[in-house]
Amino acid sequence: MEKKKNIYETTFIVNAGLDDPQIDAIVDKVQEVITKNSGEIMELAKWGRKRFAYPIKKKNNGFYVVIEFTSSGDLVARLERHFLLEENIIRFLIIGLDKKALQARISGNDLMKLSAPVTPSTSGSPLVGEAPAAEPVVPPAPAAAPTDLSTPSEA
């Protein structure tokens, strides 16, 4: 009887101090661990080098990679062990996606497209998929306080 395959997503951060071929070799090794243990990679998104909000293991930058794959549950333990033994992987996270998460999720590549800056159009029309520019909202000025600063006279 074949085990039920679940959908998982892993995000890991590789040391950004490495050269691109070295980072690619680490990503290829992770892909190899997944495929050799009866997993199937559905999507691979390399987010690239990003600056951390705070230092992690005395590093300020990392190369982010997101992989979505299907597998039985025993692969997750093997993949975690690989992440822990690989010294150039700074952090990792593996989550199992349930039905609600699958319906609501945005793929890693689509997320990168959404976070990319939109260049303004040279013509007066908005870009495809871009909402028309709204007028800036200016809050109303506060009501002026009385300007009479004289002291009240005693009667």
Image (cartoon, rainbow, N blue to C red):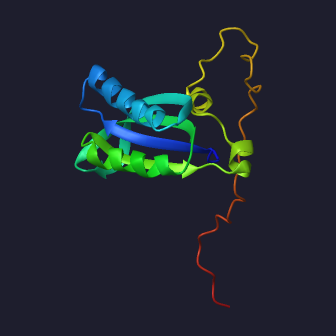
User: Which residue is more in the foreground, 142 or 154?
Assistant: 142
Residue at the far top: name it: 123
User: Which residue is more in the foreground, 136 or 10?
Assistant: 10
Residue 78 position in % (x across, y down): 40, 48
**Which quadrant, please, contains the C terminus?**
bottom right
Residue name at image x 31 percent, y 25 percent: 25
Q: Is 37 displayed left or right of 127 in the figure?
A: left
Residue 75 position in % (x across, y down): 47, 46
Relative height, residue 126 to residue 142 (above, below): above
Residue name at image x 33 percent, y 37 percent: 14
Residue 123 position in % (x across, y down): 71, 8
Is any part of residue 71 visible from this angle?
yes
Residue name at image x 43 percent, y 31 percent: 31
Residue 37 position in % (x across, y down): 46, 38
Q: Quadrant of residue 9?
A: top right
Is any part of residue 140 visible from this angle?
no
Residue at the far bottom: name it: 155
Q: Is 61 displayed left or right of 97 in the figure?
A: left
Residue at the far front: name it: 1
Residue name at image x 55 percent, y 32 percent: 40
Relative height, residue 147 to residue 88 (above, below): below
Image label count: 0
User: Which residue is more in the foreground, 126 or 154?
Assistant: 126
